[in-house]
Amino acid sequence: MEPVELNPDDLAMPSTNTGNPLKEFILEGVLRRLNLTSYNRLASLQKHLAALLAEREESAKKVWSLHREIDKLELEKVRLETYIFWLEHYFKHPLTATNSAVGQTPDEMVKIIGQQLAEPNWLAPVAALLLELYRDSGDHVLDFLTSIYRQALDEHTAYWDVRKSVHILGQVLQARTYLEIGTRMGWSLAQAFRANPDVHAYSFDMWVPDYSGSQGSTEFVRGKMQQAVSPGKTPHVEFISGNSHDTLPDFFAGKLDVKPPPEFDVIVVDGDHSALGAWWDLTDVIPHIRVGGALVFDDIELTEELGHEYTTSIHPRPDAPPNMRNLVDVWRILQEHYPNFHYFTCETYSARAGVAIRMS
Ligand SMILES: C[S@@+](CC[C@H](N)C(=O)[O-])C[C@H]1O[C@@H](n2cnc3c(N)ncnc32)[C@H](O)[C@@H]1O
């Protein structure tokens, strides 16, 4: 409320019947009723009132921001409790690399990997790492993801997503070379580094802004990978930023500054989620997986469109095979086109992954 401008001549209480109705109202209705003797007193009261109102507004803002702070702290508390839950579970049910598939026959290796993918206890080190690195990041997808993990653990379900698959394959195959299309905040990449801090990783991402509500960057992800490896170690990670449909063919043709290793132990396809885009990525990387190595394809339950705005390339590209409308079809058609792989398909919950082991 703005204080009323008062005439300095009206210092003392004048007599009534001034001929000015507003002035009479102030004199009779306000000043006398409040037992005031001058306009100045009224003006100072008005100023005081205005100051009180401003103070009240300021306090309301502070209360609002305190409420938000409390909400934030409560969310942090829940995430911290969830983190402690998974850490405790992990220590009670330790999983070690005793199930290494290195040096095993192909059949034995496939058996080990199948058993490990189905094992719900692997969700513990995966969730614990995600919460260790990202619980303060404000990314609500993390709450969604850890609630799926918890459900899978409680229901003892054979569930694996890209993060769990990478963690297992990283350990079981002792992966030294890792390529990933689609890094975002680095949730899957961190699993590769935790499984083997000496891994050489190649991250392909075009950093689509605000992807699923958040997006990382090369600096952000590098910082997180530094946290994922032991102190004193430097994570070996190369970032190839840009549309994978442009960068992957150039990378494998040796045309980029970053040169590819002869072959990869583990490759993850989790970038363009359109059917055609995923198909291009898959067919680009598959020849570069070593025999005995693994492919991980995420979100195999998704029924997105055939192509979208990023499904473009500077290189000539194949058409989609007939009847390929979504990622469900892509995963099925991949198995028909590449029978030299052994396929594991997760059938439960959402955000589930397919894993393929190269047999020959
Ligand atoms: C589902 S997120 C990856 C999630 C990550 N693997 C994880 O474990 O949290 C998909 C990422 O792929 C990137 N992306 C989408 N289309 C792409 C394309 N055509 N080329 C390169 N990156 C792409 C997006 O920027 C996004 O960061």
Image (cartoon, grey):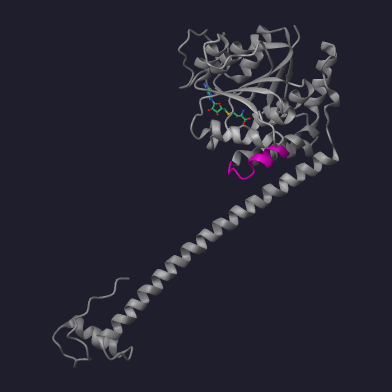
In this picture, is 126 found above or below 71? above
Q: Quadrant of residue 154?
A: top right
Report the magenta residues as a range: 128-139
In reply to whether residue 104 is colored magenta, the answer given is no
Q: Is there any visible trace of residue 58 in the rendered image?
A: yes
**Quick check: 77 left or right of 15?**
right
**Residue at the spot x=32%, y=78% of the render?**
46
Q: How many marks?
A: 0
Residue 171, horizontal then vertical, whole percent: 77, 25
- As displayed, is residue 76 above or below residue 65? above
Residue at image coords 46%, 16%: 312
Quarter of the image that includes the N terminus? bottom left
- Pick the quarter of the image with the C terminus: top right
Against 357, residue 98 (above or below) is below
Q: Is residue 350 visible?
A: no
Nearest the viewer among 139 and 134 is 134
Relative image position of residue 209 (x, y in whole percent): 48, 32
Is residue 106 left or right of 33 when viewed as pictured?
right
Is residue 131 rendered magenta in the image?
yes
Q: Residue at x 66, y 30 (%)?
A: 234
Residue 163: x percent and y percent?
69, 29
Q: Position of residue 204 (x, y in %)?
A: 56, 22
Quarter of the figure with residue 235:
top right
Q: Quadrant of residue 302?
A: top right
**Left or right position of 26 against 310:** left
- Which quadrant of the picture is home to ligand 1? top right
